[in-house]
Image (cartoon, rainbow, N blue to C red):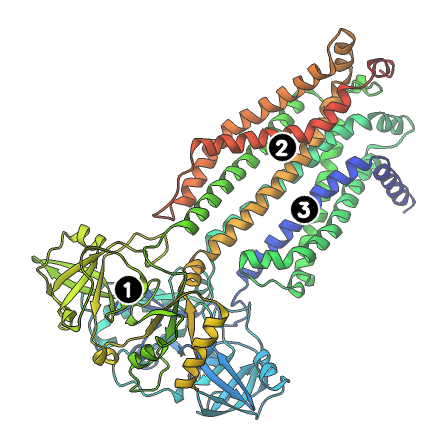
Amino acid sequence: MDILLHLMRLTLRNFVKNKFYSITIIAGFSIAIAICYLIVGLLVHENSIDGFHTRKDTIYRVLMKDPITYGTSYTTYHELYEKLQTDYPEVKLVSHVTYQGWHTIKAGKNKFQEKRLLYADTNFFKLFDYEVLLGNRASALSDPHAVVLTQATAGKYFGTQDAVGQTIQVDDQPYTVTAIAADVAGTSHLQFDMLLPAAVLPEAVNPLQGAGFTYIVLTSPGDANALTDKLNANVESVLSWKFATPQTSVFQLQSLKDCYFSDVQYGESSVLLSQDRTFLSRSGLAILIIVFITTFNFVNFSQARALFRSKEIVVLSIFGTGRGIVMLQFVIEAALLCAIAFVISLILILSTLSFFNDITGIALDLQFLFSPALLGMIGGMVLLMSVVLGFITYFLFAQVHDDKLLKSTVTLKPAYLKVLNGLIMIQICTSITLMLLNTAIWKQMNFISKQTVGSVTESILEINLLDLPPGVNPTVIKTDLQKNPEVIGASVCMGIPLEGRATHGMEADGKKMDLNLIIGDLDYVKTMGYEIAKGRDFMTLADTSYMLLNETAMKIYGMNDNFESEDQYAPKNVIGVVKDFHFESLREQIEPVNITLVNPREVSAWGASKLLVRTYGDSDDILRKLRTQWAALFPDVAFDYSILKEKYHAIYAKDQGHATLLMVGSIASTIITLVGLIGVSLYTTHRRSKEIAIRKVYGASSNTILLSFIRQITTWTLISAVAAVPVAMYFIEEWMSGFVYRTTVAWQDYLKVIAGAVLLITLAILYQVTLSSYKNPAKVLRND
């Protein structure tokens, strides 16, 4: 114990004596540990989603091809739900969950608009293990007038979580709270604030009613493939309707652990969360890079320390201090450095957590980050790292030439110098690669933000019409809202950019084709701001026998005015061509589109789902006026709207967040690399101090010596840059390949990054090199 206390005092004395070294290395370690801690926390959190369900290995979600778009969809219908319960013995349990958008909730005198409301059957709490805090989970959804609230929702409505027995109204229908469930935010891919019994939904009378998400429990995970094959072999017996175009692999089973990492698109992200596996794998790679750079930064500083403390170590040896004690001293020094850095990193995490959550879109909280399990994991990794670094330091001391231990010209063995110099260049290469990749990503995101989408998005509101009372003609609402002087135009439609399009089969000159179908009224094209490239827009209701196509449709199919449609309601002749517009992200190729005119009297039959309102802006004042007009017409129907501009931005929200995270990682790795280069400059200038002094004695100026050092580090940087460019080009191409429409990274961009790297690295070593260059050569030679 005495020897440990002595070594700790000696370590603290060395820290105080070498303040520059201590502060610099601790700063680098603190940044590295903080970033790694946050990313490890993110990886652990994301991979634990849905992990609390006891049947997680045998729960699957059923996917099927959409009957309109033919794309794989989460949405299934009541026929499948019923068949799975009766005709497939390998299915132990089935639960069907339905989502229907916004609802108006009344609790006492308070009124709320809620979006995360699900309808669930009585098997819901049998299949899933969502925690029920109050009430009976077995019977919570048995009563048609029951409602289950989460604890946060109960607190919002009643000021207390103990709300069992209280009454609320959902869309003017009374429901009694039968149970309180734990909040599910951040723990499940399936999100909800309240659950209503599926029994209150209207009985499905046609095959495409009862749309929702179907989950099953299998007897064994090995039954999944067999059940998938069986369902696809019996599509006609499972579904009473047929696809307009024959489809293969109609059904798929998705394991619960894959639900959160699914790449299947769904229009409403508030109830179904998802994550990109690629983002997580890149985050894991970032940890390895940062650990690599940080470790070799410590090695760089250890080189310098091996020179400055060589006499101390040889004196200890003379007085009989064993190698084990010396090794223990280095381990204690490294452990204490890491411990101080670890504490500082926790402070950094506290101050940056909100920013980290914003850029990743993931709500990590302090309770999770500082949980004993995660804290112990990171603490153990830091402790292991400190032991390894202590051994590395001792190893470097052991490589010092024994015959020069008491001289100031002590150096490491040439072989190890070459290895360490190579590692320095790898560090520089890694940092330049990240800087180049970061430049390309931000250039692409800037390109996206400035890209015109072919329509007006800045001032268009999209109002949901699905919750209107039966029999209401949406054109009445349109006419009323157009009385507002702030409104430029409005259109009732089914089909808008980003969502709501159907796939429409057509035939021209004997050639079959599929087009995206958008149905709108006379004002649709003008409201969206589409440009007519050829022909004309719809002018009167007599034009319902015509259609508009986009340029891509004309180009791909070589269309003319002679059409035979497979749909009895579809028009047959082209009246005009609109310029191409993006109705999906820039990751996707523009597809052929058919815009069809609908008669206002038939708008309900067409299933109009949206009212687009174009205004002179989207200020709070305009929204307030529109909301007031809506409330006067439908006081009990939620004013469910979104701004089209924000929906476009939301497409790239994750990309923007990932780009920001990469930028932060690049900056951090660059700072850590620069810190390491300071250690290199310490070692290099000390190793070459006698050479510098002799050169000055023979007439070399301080500036000449300074330039020689700058030349050397510039050469290292340029060699590293040559190696970094092809690596960066590979990763840039891999990332850019996800975008059909993308910018280019010019050679000037590469030169700017490399020039910036040279400047930063030069500045990092300038202080120490300048200090050494201007030393009095007489003092240096006298001390040798």
Q: Where is residue 136 shown, x and y percent of the image?
A: 55, 88
The numbered disc on residue 526 is 1
Per the model, the C-alpha gap separating discs 3 and 2 is: 18 Å
Of labels 1 and 2, earlier in sequence is: 1
* Secondary structure under the numbered disc 1 in the rendered image: helix
Q: Mark 3 vs mark 1: give the one in front.
A: 1
Q: Quadrant of the C terminus?
A: top right
Q: How many marks?
A: 3
Q: Where is residue 718 shown, x and y percent of the image?
A: 55, 25
Mark 3 closeness class: few <14, some 14–19, many ≥20 residues within 10 Å: many
Query: Residue 59: which quarter of the image?
Result: bottom left
The numbered disc on residue 728 is none
Query: In the image, 317: left or right of 670?
Result: right
Per the model, the C-alpha gap separating discs 3 and 1 is: 53 Å
Amino acid at pointer 2: Leu
Mark 1 closeness class: few <14, some 14–19, many ≥20 residues within 10 Å: some
Which residue is denoted by mark 3 in the rendering?
Answer: 31
Q: Mark 3 vs mark 2: give the one in front.
A: 2
Mark 2 closeness class: few <14, some 14–19, many ≥20 residues within 10 Å: some
Q: Mark 1 vs mark 2: give the one in front.
A: 1
Which residue is denoted by mark 2 in the rendering?
Answer: 760
Q: Residue furthest top?
A: 698
* Secondary structure under the numbered disc 2 in the rendered image: helix
